[in-house]
Amino acid sequence: MAVALMFVIEGVLPFLVPSVWREAFRRITQFTDGQIRFFGLSSMLLGLVLLFLAK
């Protein structure tokens, strides 16, 4: 169920405003590996905090 919800949330931006999504994706491809790792780590930590608060 959580994976399905993730797909729904991830699909909202490209569905509603594909040009904004394309530009954001273009900028992300220019990030360094360290910046991408930091973003990934931040996302994981935020997800864990949200899971903790939901319980």
Image: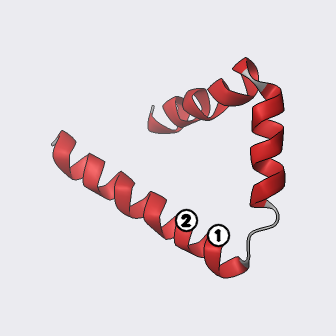
Q: Secondary structure at mark 2?
A: helix
Q: Amino acid at mark 1?
A: Ile
Q: Residues within 10 Å of mark 2 (few under 14, many from 20)?
A: few
Residue for badge 1: 36
Marks 2 and 1 close (CB-CB < 8 Å): yes
Q: Secondary structure at mark 1?
A: helix
Q: Amino acid at mark 2?
A: Phe
Q: Nearer the viewer, residue 44 or 17?
A: 17
Q: Nearer the viewer, residue 25 or 47?
A: 25
Q: Residues within 10 Å of mark 1 (few under 14, many from 20)?
A: some
Residue 3, how many percent across, how many down? 52, 38
Q: Is residue 14 above or below residue 22?
A: above
- Taking the image as shown, residue 41 lies to the left or right of residue 48, namely right
- Callout count: 2
Residue for badge 2: 39
Residue drawn at (67%, 28%) of the image? 13
